[in-house]
Amino acid sequence: MFEILEKESLNPTVTKMVVKAPLIAKKAQPGQFIILRAEENGERIPLTIADYDREAGTITIIFQIVGKTTMRLQDLSVGEPLPTFVGPLGSASEIKGLKKVAVIGGGVGCAIAYPLAKALHEQGTIVHTVTGFRNRDLVILEEAFTKVSDRYELISDDGSTGRKGLVTDVLREWIEQGERYDEVIAIGPLAMMKFVSLLTKRYGIKTIVSMNPIMIDGTGMCGGCRISVGGEVKFACVDGPDFDGHLVDFDEAISRSATYRAFEARKREEYCQLMGKKEA
């Protein structure tokens, strides 16, 4: 049922897929996610809905190849089915009524930021966007962001493309130039979202971050995606994934994000050996 209709490499480690899923496409909203399996009895992983087409009945996902499951997903070809593709899950992003928004995307998090920037643009919101990457080889969706942004700046850590620096450098400049935002939306690495939130807190600008930790069942039952927000335990799969960035305990989230790093590396190595591949 969930046939892969299109597959495109966006950079050496990031792939875009378009999947046939008419019932999900009918209900999907920006900010929501799906949970999939790349093979029967495989691991369940969450991926944010990068785009959807209600008429065509398709869902677009963008994923980074980091572990066994995403490697297995990468090995699938157009025409093959996914055994599990569940959604839409999570709460849709609340964007109605926003007049001017700064969207900050980092790395593969730009795949999550794009559908929000697009939806904001389509409802008439003024959209200013900053996207940051380590280098030019990792850039994704530059043209797509340009089309839906009234102001756009590309940043790279090494200066190999766009402007050299940090996304917070640009956001700070825009604010100090007199730009007034109803909201800042930051999506990307936890450290990036932390420092964007620290910056905007100084200026009193509401900031929303998308938390995408480990999710298993997607219903709040397993507790794998728990985070602390304002001193309370929340579950990203049912309470989010969007949260007030000024209330998120990023230090705790960063610490928890490393919990399964060694396990993921071992599984990746095992899969490479099984498939006769050289590990990237």
Image: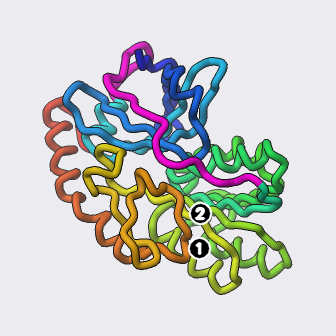
Q: Which residue is mark 2?
A: 186
- x and y, in percent, of residue 30 in the image: 61, 44
Q: Which residues are magenta?
A: 75-96
Q: Measuring 36% from the left and 31% from the top, which residue is drawn there?
A: 74
Is label 1 in a helix, a strand or a loop? Answer: helix
Picture disc at residue 114: none
Decide if residue 194 is in sight here. yes
**Residue 221 location (% of width, % of height):** 28, 50
Instruction: Look at the numbered disc 2 and give the secondary structure of its residue.
Output: strand
**Foreground residue among 270 and 222:** 222
Q: Indicate whether 244 appears above or below 35.
A: below
Quadrant in the picture for residue 172: bottom right
How are the residues colored?
rainbow
In the image, 253: left or right of 242? left
Residue 240, position in %: x, y? 48, 56
Q: Indicate whether 176 appears above or below 187.
A: below
Residue 28, located in which quarter of the rendered image? top right
- Against 158, residue 137 (above or below) is above
Residue at figure coordinates x 66%, y 76% from the top left: 169
Q: Which residue is mark 1?
A: 196
Indicate whether residue 11 is drawn in magenta: no
How far is disc 2 from disc 1 in space, using C-alphas? 7 Å
Amino acid type at mark 2: Ala
Which quadrant does the N terminus fall into?
Answer: top left
- Can residue 14 be seen in this snapshot? no
Q: In the image, residue 53 lies at what x, y percent?
A: 63, 26
2 and 1 marks in contact (CB < 8 Å):
yes
How packed mark 2 is, by other alpha carbons closer than 10 Å (few <14, some 14-19, many 20 or more), is many
Q: Amino acid at mark 1?
A: Val
